[in-house]
Image (spheres, grey):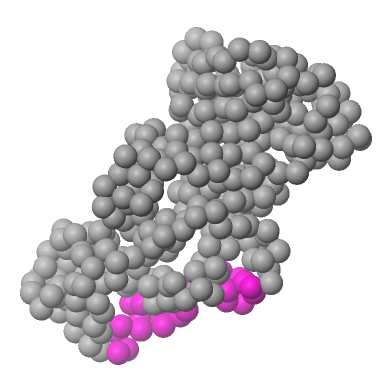
Amino acid sequence: MYQKTITEREAGQRFDKYLRKLLPEAGSGFLYKMLRKKNIVLNEKKADGAEKIACGDVVAIYFSEETLRKFMGNGENPVRKEDGKGLSSSADTALLGITVLYENEHILLANKPAGVLTQKAVKEDVSLNEWLIDYLLKEKQITAEELRTFRPAACNRLDRNTSGIVLCAKSVPGAQMLSEGLQARSLHKFYRLYVKGRLEEEQTIEGFLRKEERGNKVRIYTDRKDEASFIRTRYMPIRQERDKTLLEAELITGKTHQIRAHLASIGHPLLGDYKYGDRSFNEQYRRKYQVEHQLLHAYKIVFPPLTAPFGEISERTFRAPVPEIFDRVRN
């Protein structure tokens, strides 16, 4: 027999979804059969799997130890085993240079440096998601057993060479709140960036963005095209300099490479952006200031009005310090 009390971190998900994560080697049909036969019960009562589990609920599974090991994955450690070496060392994740801006029991706001992946591109990568698991395990905020049924992760994604705030969920309620806020666009995200040329007035620009089939690029159109998504970006000039402008931009919609491609499409590409930018302009700053990537920083997040258990962050604003390179290139 296996018995488990649901923690606050795991609460809020459907019971059948929880079971599929707890017993990944068991098929859905088998799990529903075990529910019908009361070999799996919730709070000592028959369940159909559609229930939403709550903190303090008790799950009981009346399987043999051998069967449990089989359906749990032969008892393997659920903490990152893709490379056969288990979890990355603390030294590895510390080298990523990620810092915590804010956290509570449900969410964590991480400040990601440029050069770090939000999520891995290939199996061997160590990304912010691995850092998050490592951090929570080291701080004893989560156990390996809990990772079977809920895995903390980033809820938004920044390009490898974009720095700044990444929203991370530490619990199911936290993941639901962040996902809903991002989808409803009630979480307001602001970026700091340098662009080529002078911009002197606040503007809201619109267009249509379509992913290209090759090269991991997008293309901006002024008129709607097939498979293109509508985009809207607002920018506010902060400071004009000799050959560039420091902007604050708000992503009103949030699409891949939106800021980079949208500003380039109006003739003001980002400094250091070799994918959408001006190579000659970028090379001047690379030689003089060692600018190797686009100067784009996810600077600020503003939360909407929220109710319990998120009252502490309701309508609050959080900022990530702008990287030193922004001051270094000032002229």
Give the vertical position of 7 relative to 273 (above or below): below
Q: Residue at x 50, y 55 (%)?
A: 102
Count of marks placed on residues: 0
Q: Position of residue 255 (x, y in %)?
A: 50, 31
Quadrant of the image containing the C terminus: top right
Q: Position of residue 230 (x, y in %)?
A: 45, 20
Residue furthest to the top: 223
Q: Is residue 10 left or right of residue 202?
A: left
Q: Is residue 65 left or right of residue 122?
A: left
Q: Quadrant of residue 197?
A: top right
Q: Residue at x 29, y 66 (%)?
A: 8
Q: Nearer the viewer, residue 91 or 23?
A: 91
Q: Answer whether residue 154 is visible to the viewer in this image.
A: no
Determine the main secondary structure of the stretch shown in magenta: loop
Q: Position of residue 35 (x, y in %)?
A: 14, 71
Residue 102 part of the magenta-drawn span: no
Q: Answer whether residue 8 is visible to the viewer in this image.
A: yes
Q: Residue at x 75, y 44 (%)?
A: 324
Q: Is residue 258 left or right of residue 281?
A: left
Q: Residue at x 15, y 61 (%)?
A: 51
Q: Nearer the viewer, residue 176 or 80?
A: 176
Q: Quadrant of residue 212?
A: top right
Q: Position of residue 249 (x, y in %)?
A: 57, 27
Q: Magenta span covers which residues?
A: 65-90
Q: Quadrant of residue 162?
A: top right
